[in-house]
Image: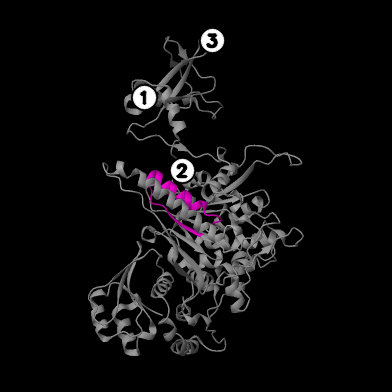
Amino acid sequence: MSELDKKLMQTPDLNKERLEKLKSLFPDLFTAEGNLNPDELKKIVDPDLVKETERFEFKWFGKSEAKRTAFTPSKATLLYDEERSVNPEYADGNMIIEGENLETLKCLLAGYRERVKCIYIDPPYNTGKDFVYSDKWDENKEDYWDHIGVTEDGVKVDTNLETSGRYHSNWLNMIYSRLLLARQLLREDGVILISIDDNEVHHLRKLCNEVFGDDNFIDCIVWKKRYGGGAKEKHLVTLHEYILFYAKDITKINPIFIANSEEAIDRYYKLKDENSETRGGYRTHPLEATKSMGDRPNLIFPITDPDGTEVFPKRQWLWGKDRVETALAKGEIAFLKDKEGNWSIHTKQYLRDEQGNVRQSKAFSIIEDVFTQHGTNEVIEIFGNAQIFSFPKPTSFISKLLSIGTEENESHIVLDFFAGCGTTAQSVLELNEKDGGNRKFILVQIPELTDETSEAYKAGYKKISEITIERNKRVIQKIEKEEAEKQPSLLDSDKKPFKTGFKVYKLAKSNFPRVDFAPDPAKTEEGNLALLDKYIDEKEAMFLSMVDEKNIFDEALLKNGFMLNYLKVKADGFSKNKVFQIKDGFKECLICMDMNLSKETLKELEQFKDKIFICLERALDTTMKWNLKHLLGDKLIAF
């Protein structure tokens, strides 16, 4: 990132990063002036310099612009809303962000890049009735900030009617730019799950293959969303939706298992043997293969049944002879008689393995035991009115997805940037309470206005984001009530009461007036830096003194790569300036937002020269800046 970009408090410019990476790998593709030479690039793609031949490619109107939009930096920030936060002292990284999600993802980019383990989104389906997000970044400043949700009027959205010549293109442009950013936020072993229906699943699959790579496709999960019905449907009764499941890098993903349900565990207790005291009951599975596994003579051999008769497979066994003999010696083979009195040979699958661990099951790519009605029932339970939010996903449905996307003993971050009424947050909270996990959630919900005739509006919810926040506030209150009722029993155990909360943030214009500075294209970077310094001196100092200190720290740290759940303590050893020590679990630094930095502070920093130091550049005179640069080198971040 250039010095000018750093000073302008922009989020990372991904287009510049990609060009710089390309230049470092292939400098021969660039001119002497440092510009990409398209002809040299074409020679790699097309060595014979012939016109492009026909090839498979997924194109739509506006695709290139959507990609540029995704990688264009943002000057927005996130402002802490203490009043609407719930138990912020126990938030531990849980956040609900009210704002347009493309800009919000850009704000999260520096601090949360490659930190998110699991993304689940339920984007608006392209039915012709739902809104699509309208990325109009060419508006004037006032319209722009109104558009992304800074003003009380909320966010303007468009209806994507089928009569539009760009019906599918509009929807694809909306989701494409957001998925490009989502991939940047995923860890190397991260996964993304996307709910979708028949209208766009075929297009979304091709789009995701491009963004994540078709090699990283894991499965298309089918969700049977309702029991039956369909009297109004003209042809077949549609009962299902889909969840596209991708990894960022499938080679980094561990085998996916899920914990057995109580019902599944009960099935193990029907059969017991001499091993059951340590390994629990067992289930049986035929040892004989149901179909040929190729020419495998090593899988064809006799096994002696209890009557002393040698039994040969009709096709072949699933196991080789050595493995069968070992299992026989351990009592792990079951001989069962059919109605005709013939023996059949089965393997025993115990509840626990030989180390005593409860067996886990492979996750299936179909969900058929939880329905949309369950989600509606939850809204009724929480709000007392089913019409507060239509067609919410059930918590148990999302919990199933989170159980394959996260691990209970890890502090995994779960991101949902189409949060709706906030089901994902409730699922995380309840999963953590159930299994003692430490998952964190980040929800993003656009402050879309509710219809003035709707039940939500009548109940006092003017924006969808207000429902998102209120739902999870009530969920936490319910958990607190349940925990309070458990208190007498907890006194005699080592288990601590479950405490949780979340912080609310709002997408907003930067706290730093410098973001309104427009570089002069006719001037060099040095010339624009001089103009920017003058702009900052004239407009910023007095303004910053009136802004909430926490918001200044949040923005400075977030845009310099720190997560918002950082710990901040006053650093010892500084006599003249207020210097704070910052830690976020991944990195740490010292930061001072004072308008002037004293000579004593320079001397006192000598004992911390191994740490990053962040400060305002206007706090440094030329000599101080040179001395700090000499002391700290690249660890000095002055903006």
Question: Does residue 379 show up magenta in the picture?
Answer: no
* Residue type beneath disc 1: Thr
Q: Badge 2, how many Cα within 10 Å: few under 14, some, many 20+?
A: some
Disc 2/disc 3 C-alpha distance (Å):
40 Å
Do residues under tags 2 and 3 come within 8 Å of each other at their CB atoms? no
Disc 1/disc 3 C-alpha distance (Å):
29 Å
Badge nearest the viewer, 2 or 1: 2
Q: Position of residue 265 (x, y in %)?
A: 43, 31
Q: Position of residue 195 (x, y in %)?
A: 58, 50
First along the sequence among labels 2 and 3: 2
Residue under label 1, please give it.
326
In magenta, the rendered stretch is 419-443
Do residues under tags 2 and 1 come within 8 Å of each other at their CB atoms? no
Q: Is residue 526 left or right of residue 568?
A: right
Q: Does 336 appear above or below 521?
A: above
* Residue type beneath disc 2: Ile
Is residue 179 at least partly visible in the picture?
A: no
Residue at horizontal 36 percent and vertical 44 percent from the top: 485
Residue under label 2, please give it.
256
State the quadrant of the C terminus. bottom left
Residue under label 3, please give it.
340
Q: Which one is in front, 461 or 227?
A: 461
Disc 2/disc 1 C-alpha distance (Å):
28 Å
Q: Does 502 appear above or below 267?
A: below
* Residue type beneath disc 3: Glu
Q: Label 2: state its secondary structure.
A: loop
Q: Which one is in front, 581 or 307?
A: 581
Q: Label 3: state its secondary structure.
A: loop
| Corner quadrant of residue 279 | top left
